[in-house]
Amino acid sequence: MEITTEHFDKLQFGIKSLLEGVGHLVNASGNYPQEGSVASNEMQVDEYAEEVQTVCSQASLLAESAGDHAFAVSRLLEPPLLTVSPWTSVRGALEPAAYGCWLMDPDIGGRDRIARSLAFRYGGLLHQKKAAGSMGDENGVRHAKERIQKVTADARRLGFEEKTDKKGRILGVATTLPSSTECIRDNLFNESGYRILSSVAHSHPSAMISVAFKATDESKPLLLSKNLSVGSACWLLVTAADAFSAIAWRQANYFGYDLEEFRQSLDTIYDGMGIRKENRFWCAMN
């Protein structure tokens, strides 16, 4: 089937409706775990209450980030059209969506979820320390080290072990933090798409030329002009929408929102976007 500008227009309108619709449902639920939800029940364990609250905070921030990037894709595809930056924005939507789905996995228990949260915190603090060090910010490095020590102490208090290398250096705590590629592969099932997006984000000429440029004269292939096909633009919008839908569905499940209302809203929006039911992978998610 030929992909037309009509498909693109539906997707552009749909992704905005998706963000507005999900935002309305989340706000109506108070953006907080409902009584009797998985998250609320995990909070009832006194030993884990604070850590579960951290999980909820992490999940909410990741959902906001995924939504922000997804909306950015829509804006970047409005005139004047940009051909490179939409690819990096979609990548920006996939990463927080995948880690959010990983944290709110319905097939794990509260203790495993806390382990993932601790590993995620530890990994983020390592990046924070490196960033501060690169700027010569001694106070920032010291603060990051203190927070790393706090996370390590929390992990030990809860009975989790550190992850070390062969020389005994601590690499992480509680559990192994998956790479972005692994997390997207296992939670969004889109490793191939992520690798394409990453190639563009890393400015590999072959990737950028293949998706964001074209030769203005076939006899002069080195003379390039910016170009984004309708098919590519539609793929970007669908990929961003799917990423946000995935983390929104996981959050609704974990926080105990009305899943039937959520499902109906998503179905209505995806119907308007012209996306077939068998392609709505979030429908199969718990």
Image: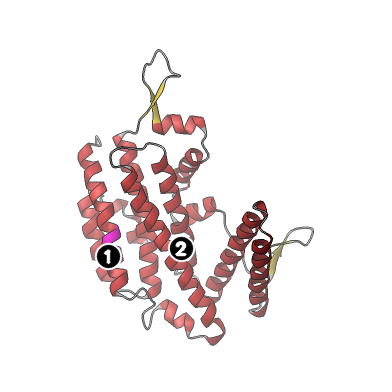
At which x and y percent is residue 48?
Answer: 54, 81
Please determine whether, in this image, residue 89 is positioned above or below residue 106. above
Disc 1: which residue: 263
What element does badge 2 sit on?
A: helix
Q: Does the magenta stretch include residue 23?
A: yes
Please determine whether, in this image, residue 228 is positioned above or below residue 40. above
Q: Which residue is drawn at 37% across and 57% down?
A: 67
Q: Which amino acid, mark 1?
A: Arg
Disc 2: which residue: 100
At which x and y percent is residue 115?
Answer: 58, 70
Q: Which amino acid, mark 2?
A: Gly
> Which residues make up the magenta segment?
19-24
- Indicate the quadrant where residue 210 lies: top left
How crowded is the residue under tag 2: few (<14 C-alpha within 10 Å), some, or many (20+)? many
What is the quadrant of the N terminus in the image?
top left
Q: Which residue is drawn at 64% across and 52% down?
A: 135
Front-most of 256 and 144?
144
- Indicate the quadrant where residue 129 lies: bottom right
Q: Is residue 115 magenta?
A: no
How far apart marks 1 and 2 lie (CA) works out to 19 Å
